[in-house]
Amino acid sequence: MTRAVAIRLGAFAGAVALAFAGAFAIGSAVDPIAAANPAPSGEHADGDAGGMSGMPEGKTGETGETGEGHEAGGAHESGHSASDTQPPGLAVSQSGYTLAPKSTFFQPGKPQQLAFTIQGPDGKPVTQYTATHEKDLHLIVVRRDLSGFHHVHPTRAADGTWSIPFTFTAGGQWRIFTDFQPTALGKTITLGADVNVSGLYIPVPLNEPASVYSVDGYAITLAGTPVAGKESELTFSVSKAGKPVTDLQPYLGAFGHLVSLRGGDLAYLHTHPSKEAKAGMTGGPGIIFGTTFPTAGTYSLFLDFQHAGKVRTAEFTVNVGTDGTAIVPPSELPGAAEESPHGHG
Ligand SMILES: [Cu+2]
């Protein structure tokens, strides 16, 4: 599914790691999550999301701009953000809904139940959801250094408790994102919470920014010119053994799912291709996304795609500026002889 954290340790470089660890510490220190405290059941029946989330009034995505992540068809993403609107995923509570993990303490390397509820404005676990991309809830799990990415789908018990067996690959602070649409709210929201995994924490530096990533014999090439604050077209092209893959399979109603996380605070954007995918259709090699990165910065991009019955994840590090810096695949550079895939390690 994704490579183990241990594999990324192969790319570990002391100097880079030290620099990264510094940046990481700063990122953690300013994280609004630190100020957000999951309210116990019943304490937020007034639905005052602005007050609960520890964010200023009017900055919790109430404009409707952040809730459009999952409608079928059309280019859309969860991160479309007005200038002073916070992107999704930064708060444990928003619009009256609160992510409440059953436990926030885990051990590494063994399957454990990752369980939580979404508490509604009435303080009770939400049981009515509107499916988005074929699922009532999408769960993203990633360590705070952006390693160990997983996109999974827990099951919901009758009482509203979500759970899934999950193995955290290594110690550290991990973040869980829940991306869902309460039927009563009528729009998609993304809540995030940190959980702790015991054990030695060795932060892993991000991949170098590169336009090609290799996984399982596939080379995924990224091209585009991302500009902060504007919808930017990103094109991922999938090839295998040098040949374009033209029979990508729909996965949860799309030929690709793109999750982008902002470096420093892990603000969350979930984007789907402009082209809808139905069962039986085939796609590729290109998967095109219209993504709006809310600000300049470094983002980690995780692309899930399905081929030959298996879902794989490609990971990219992208520097987004205000002036639009083109991501040019090596194969399109003047004088390029051939593709030189280099993802990680
Ligand atoms: Cu999902």
Image (spheres, grey):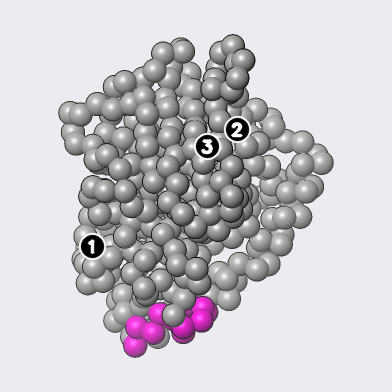
Q: Height in image: 241 above or below 191?
A: above
Which range is magenta?
46-57
Mark 3 = which residue? 315
Quadrant hosting residue 337: top right
- First along the sequence among labels 1 and 2: 1
Q: What crowding class fits label 2: few (fewer than 14 Cα within 10 Å), some (14-19), or many (20 or more)?
A: many
Q: Which secondary structure lies at badge 3?
A: strand
Q: As drawn, is 99 to the left or to the right of 203? A: left
Check residue 30 in the rendering and tell me which mark sits there, or answer none. Answer: none
| Magenta region, main secondary structure | loop
Q: Which secondary structure lies at badge 1?
A: loop
Mark 1 = which residue? 129
Residue 168: percent from the left, percent from the top? 53, 46
Mark 2 = which residue? 210
Distance (Cα) linking label 3 and label 1: 30 Å
Q: As drawn, is 296 to the left or to the right of 307? A: right
Distance (Cα) linking label 1 and label 2: 38 Å
Q: Residue at x 36, y 66 (%)?
A: 65
Residue 1: percent from the left, percent from the top? 44, 34
Q: Nearer the viewer, mark 3 or mark 2?
A: 2
Q: Is residue 308 visible?
A: no
Specify whether residue 257 is painted magenta.
no
Q: Residue at x 54, y 27 (%)?
A: 329
